[in-house]
Amino acid sequence: MGGKTYLGEFEHMVLATILRLGEGAYGTAIIVEIERETGRKVLSGSLSVTLDRLENKGHLQSQMGKADPARGGRPKRFVTVTETGFRAVRESRAAMLNLWAGLEPRFEDK
């Protein structure tokens, strides 16, 4: 597999969600979108650790917004997917699609 690094399930969800949200991607919006689309409960601490890990891997970059009075003066951390992150999502998606190819009939009768 020539040096490809595949994403974990939650990492994949987070990066895909950031891509969906575009420039407005930040913690709470990411959590809401993942929970709405998957039904999976997301803890803010888990997301924060995952965002840090993805940033350390070079898959995303973050930028702090302005202080927000509605958030007690805390700024939002906006995140965007880097080219490396986009490539990782694309490769991970392709690998899963390859594994799923031809399996659809097995699930029709279940």
Image (cartoon, rainbow, N blue to C red):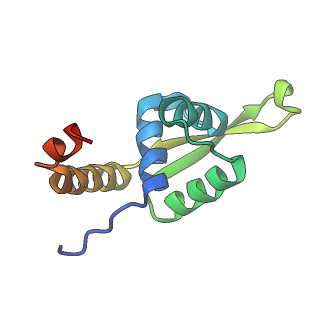
> Which residue is at the far top?
70
Occupied quadrant, residue 81: top left
Expressed as whole percent of the image width and height from the top left, the position of residue 100 reads 19, 51
Q: Quadrant of residue 30?
A: top right
In the image, 92: left or right of 51? left
Residue nearest the viewer, comparing 84 with 94:
94
User: With respect to residue 3, does 12 lie above or below?
Assistant: above
Q: Nearer the viewer, residue 98 or 45?
A: 98
Q: Residue furthest front?
A: 109
Instruction: State the image coordinates of residue 77 (x, y, percent, origin top left).
Output: 66, 42
Which quarter of the image is occupied by the C terminus?
top left
Q: Residue at x 52, y 58 (%)?
A: 55
Q: Residue at x 20, y 49 (%)?
A: 97
Relative side of 10 to 90, left or right: right
Q: Position of residue 33 (x, y in %)?
A: 54, 31
In the rendered view, tell whether residue 9 sits above or below residue 36.
Answer: below
The residue sitting at 71% across, 53% down in the picture is 45
In this rendered view, identify the residue nearer to me: 39 or 55: 39
Give the farthest residue toward the bottom: 2
User: Is residue 40 toward the left or the right of residue 46 in the image?
Assistant: left
Give the total of numbered labels. Answer: 0
User: What residue appears at the point 19 percent right and 57 percent down from the top-left corner?
Assistant: 99
Q: Position of residue 54 (x, y in %)?
A: 50, 58
User: With 36 as the anchor, is 41 left or right in this view?
Assistant: right
Residue 9 sits above or below residue 30 on the image: below
Q: Is residue 75 above or below residue 60?
A: above
What is the residue that sits farthest to the right in this orientation? Answer: 72
Q: Quadrant of the N terminus?
A: bottom left
